Amino acid sequence: MELPAAEWEPPLDELIQNIIARDESALDAFYARTCNRVFGIALKILTRQEPAEEATLEVYAKVWQRAASFQAEKGKVIIWLNTLARNTALDIRRREHRGIAVQTDDGQWIETTSVPPEQEMNTYHGERRRRIQHLLSELSQEQRRVIEAAYFKGLTHSEIAEALDMPLGSVKTRIRSALVTLRRGLQDFQGSIL
């Protein structure tokens, strides 16, 4: 028996191909289907919600940037995504626990040593977290609400539409435009520290 069209979801392989073609709605659908898994992997490795949320955002930025590197003949999409999530979380954990070059307000670079968690905000990780928080604060209230519901609460687009009493199309549009804004802001930040 065939599912009604509204209940059919494209396979992850198809979504990856559409992401390679720069279809942002495919990224939205891919995120909605896999974000709980990615967040769970990140949380297990990092043990704290904030870094796990950051890792989750970073994973989907990498999916957008690196989808073309997925090779179906080497394994399933979900295995590739699990590996990406695991490696991203491990990278964040390493950055938290070792010396990192940090640019000060006056433009000089200093090498930090391993820092305790209370001094984390002096590291690249802390700077990146501040940048993400700043970018989130610059979003419109509607964009921020749907991003928080999707990325930090793990709700699907349909659940967000229901919870916020908003049309599904509006939810998808706001998530898509917010992700574009966040991606640009993070690319600018990464470019400025390289």
Image (cartoon, rainbow, N blue to C red):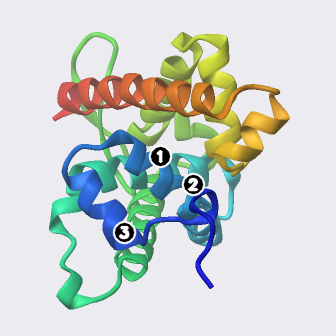
Please name the amino acid that badge 1 sits on: Asp
| Residue hosting label 2 | 32
For the residues bearing labels 3 and 2, Cβ distance under 8 angstroms: no
Is residue 160 shown above or below 94? above
- 3 vs 2, front mark: 2
| Quadrant position of residue 125 | top left
For the residues bearing labels 2 and 1, Cβ distance under 8 angstroms: yes
Is residue 37 shown above or below 111? below
Q: Nearer the viewer, residue 9 or 80?
A: 9
- SS for callout 2: helix
- The residue sitting at 68% across, 56% down in the picture is 48
Please name the amino acid that badge 2 sits on: Ala
Q: Residue 52, position in %: x, y?
A: 59, 55
Pointer 1 local density, CA inside 10 Å: few below 14, some 14–19, many at least 20:
many
Q: Along the polypeptide, which appears first: circle 3 or circle 2?
A: 2
What's the CA distance linking mark 3 and mark 1?
Answer: 17 Å
The quadrant the N terminus occupies is bottom right
What's the CA distance linking mark 2 and mark 1?
Answer: 6 Å
Please name the amino acid that badge 3 sits on: Leu
- The residue sitting at 59% across, 21% down in the picture is 143
Pointer 2 local density, CA inside 10 Å: few below 14, some 14–19, many at least 20:
some
| Residue hosting label 1 | 28
Q: Along the polypeptide, which appears first: circle 3 or circle 1?
A: 1
Q: Which mark is residue 84?
A: 3
